[in-house]
Amino acid sequence: MQEYPRRDGIAASTVCQQRSTAMGYHFREADIEPLLLMIADQMHGSSRRSDDPVRRSPAIVDLISNMAALARLSAEPAETRLRVGPLELDLIDRTAKRGDRPIDLRPREFQLLKYMMQRSGELVTRAALFRDVWNYKFVPESNLVDVHMGRLRRKVDGANETPMICNVRGAGFILASTQ
């Protein structure tokens, strides 16, 4: 196994900061494993080397392999603006506008609109919204999604504008371009 230099938390965070970009942290695989091993070592209060196979728990090994796989993914720049017809969502500034009209969104409405815009033209079910936007593990018998979609629809589809958010009765919702 490759030997990694021992780093304290400050030195490790300095390495992380040096690897950061405007869109978030992007680590090289070589930086992730020693950092995670150092954290695991401190959590166990051990003074032994964390690369000692006896000390590594299966959960730490899984965590390291998952983080290393993420580091190997290409670091393509992430999209910072979503557009569907005249509707635009800025993911950095967390702002929305339809044409030139700004839309004031609450945090959950922002998440909901982002989710819908990423699936533009597709039917989005209530169950998918509960799972992916609210992080529910079950589908409650509730009108929570309908209430939030109603508020969002009133904000996005202003007076005298062609509706973009459509309700498909008994199935879900579709966000479609008006153009």
Image (cartoon, rainbow, N blue to C red):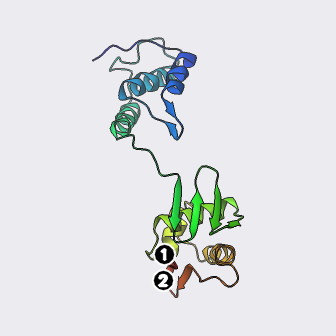
> Local crowd at mark 1 within 10 Å, few (<14), some, or many (≥20)?
some
Q: Answer left or right for 170 relative to 61.
A: right
Q: Give the residue displayed 64% in from the left and 54% down from the top.
A: 94
Q: Give the residue displayed 62% in from the left and 69% down from the top.
A: 99
Q: Secondary structure at mark 1?
A: strand
**Percent of width and height locating residue 69:** 34, 38
**Percent of width and height locating residue 148:** 65, 72
Q: Earlier in the sequence, mark 2 or mark 1?
A: 1
- Above or below: residue 123 compared with residue 29: below
Amino acid marked by disc 2? Ala
- Above or below: residue 11 compared with residue 120: above
Q: Are marks 2 and 1 in contact (CB under 8 Å)?
A: yes
Q: Does any portion of residue 44 appear in the rendered image? A: yes
Q: Which residue is mark 2?
A: 171
- Above or below: residue 121 compared with residue 44: below
- Above or below: residue 32 compared with residue 138: above
Q: Give the residue displayed 64% in from the left and 62% down from the top.
A: 96
Q: Quadrant of the N terminus?
A: top left
- Residue furthest bottom in the image: 169
Q: Secondary structure at mark 2?
A: loop
73 or 34: nearer the eye?
73
Q: Does any portion of residue 137 appear in the rendered image? A: no
Residue 125: mark in rendering:
1
